[in-house]
Amino acid sequence: MDLGGIGQPLSLLCNPLISHLSLYDIVNTPGIAVDLSHISTSSQVVGYLPSDNGLEKALTGSDIVIIAAVEMLKYQDLFATNSKIVYDLAKVIAKCSPDAFILIISNPVNSIVPIITQVLKDCNVLNPRKLFGVTTLDIVRLSKFITEYVSENVEPGHYTIPVVGGHSGMTIIPLISQSDPKVELSEEQLRSLIHKVQYAGDEVVKAKDRNGSATLSMAYSAFILIDAILKIGFLIFYRSLLILVYAKTGVSGIVQCSFVYLPGISGGNEIMEKINNLSFFSVPLVLGKDGIEKVHSFDFVFEIEKQLLKTALPEIRKDIDKGLSFYTEYSK
């Protein structure tokens, strides 16, 4: 678990907007909590360690949990480490905050979300409307990168473009055809832009001499999703590394993309018919005070998007199966 790379900057971004910030990690949380508590906001900050049931104290009564456990390792080791962390966290979530919204930053998202889903399902507390694999970074990157490909002098964020599929490499499917406003790009530009978005994470790892991955941009991107929750009127209390958000009231209509468990979500079955019956997929979602209201309509229009889908589907299925296989073995 990491309260440095993602947890600390995310806590800093959220601090001015919240009432209570409670930190949990295996080390250093009391000191980090004191540091954050000196910021001139009304937020109360508390740090928990594993001793004295710290995790249960951090989770009990929480309405939204954000899991940002991160290890800076190669993909295979990343899965082996984070899968065990999130499995154990999910068990405590099921016990202490079974009605919580759960937002998962921990990679590999394509495999981690199925693990948590299965834990919650077997504990009889799964609510697909409240479970989110955070893929916002792909959208943030696309919003930034596309400005390099258009002739107009526009700011990042000018184009709203959904990114569907998964959250790694070739599983990431930017739907440029769904851009609002519409954007005109050549075939060469499309392929270049899509590749840049899909493998932007590798660029960060290389630039950091393989000593880290995207953390600051990930924290910012997670905050975008949190900000969407704020905009629908939620009363927020954050706790990080687990950031726990207490949702009281809200209105519907905010659209965000996330990697979700489609069964049980309005419109999910229709999407599954388009994607070879995969149960997990990143899709645009209409959010409300009770979580996901429905899948927002989208389609694969450009031929390149159809090709990307064809390539992504078997990879996403392998990732899902990897997570579920881990669960079967680890839960014995």
Image (spheres, rainbow, N blue to C red):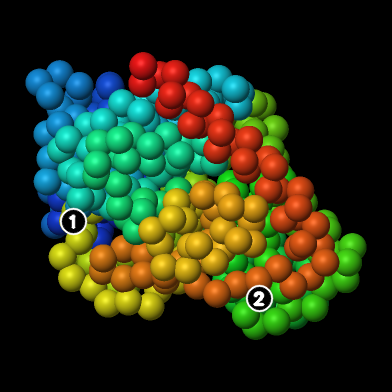
Q: Which residue in the rendered view is the most extreme toward the bottom?
A: 181
Q: Which of pointers 2 and 1 lies earlier in the amino acid sequence?
A: 2
Q: Residue at x 57, y 49 (%)?
A: 278
Q: Position of residue 107 (x, y in %)?
A: 51, 36
Q: Residue at x 55, y 53 (%)?
A: 281
Question: Nearest the camera: 305 or 70?
Answer: 305
Q: Is residue 135 visible?
A: no
Left or right? Give the position of 252 relative to 234.
right
Q: Residue at x 30, y 39 (%)?
A: 120
**For residue 188, what is the image quadrant?**
bottom right
Q: Is residue 179 visible?
A: yes
Q: Amino acid at mark 1?
A: Tyr
Q: Residue at x 31, y 63 (%)?
A: 291
Q: Position of residue 183 (x, y in %)?
A: 74, 78
Label 1 belongs to which residue?
246
Label 2 belongs to which residue?
179
Position of residue 313 relative to residue 24, above or below, is below
Left or right? Give the position of 183 relative to 1.
right
**For residue 207, what is the image quadrant?**
top right
Q: Position of residue 273 (x, y in %)?
A: 60, 61
Measured in 3D between alpha carbons, the distance from the residue under mark 2 to the one under mark 1, in whole angstroms, is 33 Å
Position of residue 295 relative to residue 123, above or below, is below
Mark 2 touching mark 1, by CB under 8 A? no
Position of residue 288 relative to residue 241, above or below, is below
Q: Amino acid at mark 2?
A: Ser
Q: Find numbered disc 2 in the image and state the secondary structure of the residue it sits on.
A: loop
- The numbered mark at residue 151 is none
Q: Position of residue 26 (x, y in %)?
A: 28, 22
